[in-house]
Image (cartoon, rainbow, N blue to C red):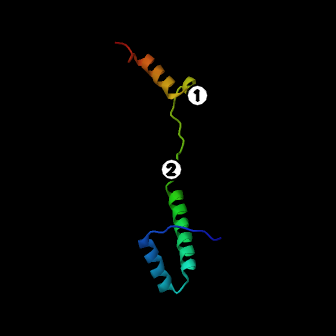
């Protein structure tokens, strides 16, 4: 596919130097750099995923489906924290 991209001068110089050193065409070098860069980004994205392991909190059965606000209100009522 043919497309037009804007590349900053420093990156363009680096790509041209890399192309000359490798003996490949500029187009092939750019394609290789993009392919490696995209693969690297995918690896980083997969590595940065957060894994959450569920665990039981030991809540009373009446609180299992309650929201955190409901749990807090119940705790406040039971401990008398809401009294002045």
Can you say whether 39 is above or below 20 in the image?
A: above
**In terms of image quadrants, where is residue 61?**
top right
Q: Quadrant of the N terminus?
A: bottom right
- Residue appearing at x 52%, y 87% in the figure: 23
Towards the viewer: 35 or 74: 35
Towards the viewer: 66 or 5: 5
Q: Secondary structure at mark 2?
A: loop
Residue topped by disc 1: 65
Q: List the single residue furthest toward the right.
A: 1
Mark 1 / mark 2, whichever is N-terminal? 2
- Point out which mark residue 55 bears: none
Few, some or many C-alpha atoms within 10 Å of disc 1 (few <14, some 14-19, many ≥20)?
A: few
Towards the viewer: 40 or 21: 21
Q: Position of residue 52 (x, y in %)?
A: 52, 46
Q: Quadrant of the C terminus?
A: top left
- Residue appearing at x 47%, y 77% in the figure: 15
State the CA–CA distance, disc 1 to disc 2.
24 Å
Q: Position of residue 33 (x, y in %)?
A: 52, 73
Q: Nearer the viewer, mark 1 or mark 2?
A: 2
- Residue appearing at x 52%, y 68% in the figure: 37
Q: Position of residue 13 (x, y in %)?
A: 43, 77
Q: Position of residue 72 (x, y in %)?
A: 46, 24
- Residue appearing at x 52%, y 66% in the figure: 40
Residue topped by disc 2: 50
Q: Secondary structure at mark 1?
A: loop
Can you say whether 52 is above or below 19 in the image?
A: above
């Amino acid at each position: 596919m043919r497309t037009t991209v804007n590349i900053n001068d420093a990156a363009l110089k680096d790509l041209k130097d890399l192309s000359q050193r490798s003996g490949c065409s500029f187009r092939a070098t750019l394609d290789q750099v993009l392919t490696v860069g995209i693969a690297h980004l995918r690896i980083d994205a997969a590595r940065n995923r957060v894994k959450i392991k569920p665990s039981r909190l030991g809540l009373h059965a009446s609180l299992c489906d309650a929201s955190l606000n409901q749990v807090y209100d119940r705790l406040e009522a039971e401990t008398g924290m809401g009294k002045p």
